[in-house]
Image (cartoon, rainbow, N blue to C red):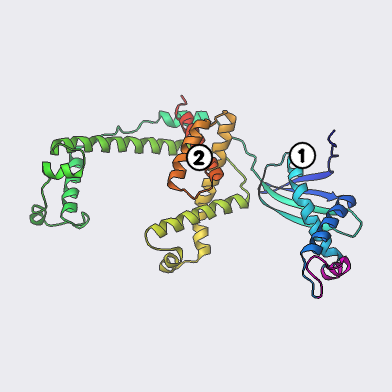
Amino acid sequence: MDEIKPKRPASVKELADSTVEIESELAAEELAHHRIHILKHLCEETEIAGFRKGFAPEKIILEKFGEMGILERAVGVALNEVYPELLLEHKIDAIGRPEINITKLSPGQPASFKIKTAVVPKFTLPDYKKIAAKIKEQKELPAEVSDKEIEELLIRLRYQLAGKNPAEKLAAEEENKLPAITDEVVKKLGDYTNVADFQTKVKVAILEDKKRQNRERKRLAIFDGILEKTVIPLPSVLIENETDYLEARFADDLKMMGSNVEDYLKKIKKTKEELRRDLRPGAEKKARTRLIFEAIAATEKIVAAPEEIKKETEHILSHHKDADQKKVEVFAESIIKNELVIQFLENQK
């Protein structure tokens, strides 16, 4: 029969900015238990002049590290076990690395400690269904493609065929000398039979792109409307994590363009700290958006199907073969679930 552990006495205090402080203690007996193991480990692993490794007397090890040094190590090992238990027992949804402070530590006595950690923020969702329905009702100009747009596209294409930049306007006489768009030219550009077929298909493609843009604008308006009505006390660790992500993505974008962050900062005469400050508003919005997505998904019981997660994971791994599969699975689930949330909001009436 499994031994039932008694509950560890602890006080949990909610602080500002979605952080909590846990105050508790380690019993003298459990601290003594960990001390024995720490001392044994140090005896086995510490190299002491005049002794073979692993054969130094306990007395010498105690002199080298000191009783308090060994107890501090014992507390650290003990808290690695105790901290997750406290989170589970008190239903604390912690994020980030905790800040640990040992408030009382003496040989043969219980050790007191305080742990401060950021937690997933508690917040109230607004009437997101009503917000989404109201924005959906807003009229927008129908997506259409004019003859002038097609004509301008053909002119830009003629510039490109001549190896010139469309932004550099040529004189009318020079423009007339640009290569003509013929059936043979468009056949080389793709699956087109002639110029008329090219124009028809390009018009359809532009129209679809405009419809997609309209849908994206509507989606953005819906979520901005929800964001505007939602107050979330963000812990600093969440903002820092999102800022790290945006900074890393920015560095990747610069690398693709053959540059790097250091050269970019020299060019614009800014420091890395100023760059992070500029990224911070976007990081805060990203953190708030992610939390809202998760909250709506939980409220509406929206989940990603396992087969869809598997399919998306395989797709991502096919392009990033060195990526950690578990992390990719979490990312894939998030992508799919977020899309389902957006579709849910789009369908509100």
> Which residue is situated farthest in the bottom direction here?
50
Considering the numbered disc 1 on the image, is that residue within a helix, a strand or a loop? helix
Q: Nearer the viewer, mark 1 or mark 2?
A: 2
Mark 1 Cα within 10 Å, few/some/many (few <14, many 20+)? few
Q: Position of residue 111 (x, y in %)?
A: 85, 54
| Whether residue 249 is situated above or below residue 151 in the rendered picture | below
Q: Is residue 73 left or right of residue 97?
A: right
- The magenta stretch is 50-64
Q: Is residue 9 left or right of residue 251?
A: right
Disc 2: which residue: 332
User: Going 30% across and 35% down the picture, which residue do you hit?
Assistant: 208
Q: Is residue 1 magenta?
A: no
Disc 1: which residue: 89
User: Going 39% across and 57% down the picture, which residue do you hit?
Assistant: 256
Measure the alpha-carbon separation of dots 1 and 2.
Answer: 30 Å
Q: Amino acid at mark 2?
A: Ala
> Which residue is situated farthest in the front direction here?
52
Q: Amino acid at mark 1?
A: Glu
User: Which label is found at residue 198?
Assistant: none
Q: Is residue 83 left or right of residue 166?
A: right
Q: Earlier in the sequence, mark 1 or mark 2?
A: 1
